[in-house]
Amino acid sequence: MPLSFAELQALLRPEWGEFHPDSNQIRGREGTGEGWDLLVVPSLSLDHHQIALVTGAHHYEERQLFSLIRLRDPGVRAVYLTSKLLPELVVDAVLELLPGVPASHARRRLHLFDTDDASARPLTEKLLERPALLERIRERLRPGRSFMTCFNVTEQEKQLSERLQVPLLGTDPALSHWGGKAGSRELFRRCAVPHPPGSPLVYDLDTLAEASAELWEAHPELSRVVVKLDQGFSGEGNAPLELAPLQLADLSGRQRRERLRQALETLAMPPPQWRQLLQVQGALVEAWLLGGEALASPSVQGMIHPGGAVEVLSTHEQVLGGVSAQTYLGCHFPADEAYRAELMRHGLAVGQALAAEGALERYAVDFVARRFGDHWDLQAIEVNLRKGGTTHPYMALRYATNGQIDASSGLFRSPTGQPLYYAATDNLCDPRLRGLLPVDLIDIVAAAGLHFDPAALHGSVFHLLGCLSEFGKLGMTCIGRSPEESESIYAATRERLIAGAEALRG
């Protein structure tokens, strides 16, 4: 009889956790009956409206190629699934970074499958429509010694796990509440993590206007609040609401609610159909943090291993943009030393609370940091129960250098002890890059000496190469031995790529 999702997850082993100490040991060799199989399903299993906001969405499946760092263990085999077949150059560019293992040896243990479907739908949805393909995938996986990993886990990934009878290292979608805005605030209260004043979850505009009025009445100094859909991601589903122009102090309670209701009617939030999503997901209103002599958007990322052990992996300074400065564009590693230890402490507390609820694998906590004199005030904003924009740059650093995080300082050190830093983006976009092929990019970067050099421990590592020619869009992680060097490499790489693309056009 097939095992249920819960029964399959009970088979997960602690050493299968991506950064678990035991996962760094070579445990088996091919042909000895040891080792295990990794199934990577890098599906962006998001609402179709949210996927439509992502340029070149199916190419984002390339970001998890850095999970193939597990192939440095000769006993590991990997199966990587995508919507369209990955070009060999894209795969080779990643495998050639593997420390201590010939790329050819790793390639023999990697099997690629695709659905031959570039439509803007989640990869998992496409896989579930193709039973013959699922059977071929299943034949590649050793029973009892295989598990799967995903970008995020929905009911579709849960169904895929049960169809393949492969345990999924990820949080059961039944626990998705803890990755929403309301669940995040509940975790922060439980863990005594500072967070902005806000409302409970509501499901219609009238109640949202009431919640906004009550928040302002409790904090009349607020000049702006932010409305958040419960399941928004990367800042999509957040919108600021300006209160100062509404002159709420001059109104009666009833008038105040009517004016807020009118303002919410015209709120410009991505996605545009947010009012329909309000009825399904719910939304809350939260104080928009202003003030201070400086403002930053740090985050902390952690891992919950099978068995419940929690590990803080990294801290970042996020680069945000878009209309309301809420959309994730890139990051710098690590976060500012002034509050890095506090970030790590809060991240560990939230991770332990999530582990107690049964969550698994990657999580991240986003913050706002404000400086007042020589003091930084940290306020937690939300929890993400999935891989995110800061996941693959850190994986690229691990992949390319074979180093590890220093748990006491939050610095990343190479095997020789050299601290390493990076600047990363998913959104290097320029129309002049359109038509540039991945092989052209490699030629330009190699000629400029900007490709990552494992001996010198600096240079650029790329992802989203499939977006380059069609959309003029690219992702990259620029590694250096100081924050200044990583920033310099980022600027130089961007400049050389654009100049090289223009030169190729003559």
Image: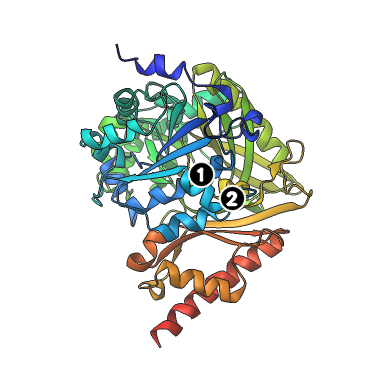
Specify the amino acid type for callout 1: Leu
Residue 241 point in image, percent of width and height: 40, 46
Which mark, by number, is residue 68? Answer: 1
From this viewpoint, which residue is outermost toward the bottom?
A: 506
Q: Residue furthest right?
A: 417
* Residue at 54 percent of width and 76 percent of height: 496
Which image quadrant for residue 342?
top right
Q: Quadrant of the C terminus?
A: bottom left
User: Sequence order check: which comes first, mark 2 or mark 1?
Assistant: 1
194 to the left or right of 275: right
Query: Few, some or many C-alpha atoms within 10 Å of disc 2 (few <14, some 14-19, many ≥20)?
Result: many
SS of the residue under disc 1:
helix
Identify which residue is drawn at 32% across, 27% down.
Answer: 164
Q: Are marks 2 and 1 in contact (CB under 8 Å)?
A: yes
Q: Position of residue 113 (x, y in %)?
A: 33, 44
**Amino acid at pointer 2:** Leu
Quarter of the picture holding the N terminus:
top left
x and y percentages locating residue 381 in the rendered image: 52, 37
Can residue 350 be seen here? The reply is yes
Q: CA distance from mark 2 to mark 1?
A: 9 Å
Q: Position of residue 108 (x, y in %)?
A: 47, 46
The residue labelled by disc 2 is 98
Nearer the observer, 173 or 413? 413
**Left or right: 76 in relation to 150:** right
Q: Is residue 282 visible?
A: no
Q: Which residue corresponds to the image point at 50% horizontal and 17% vertical from the top-left?
A: 357
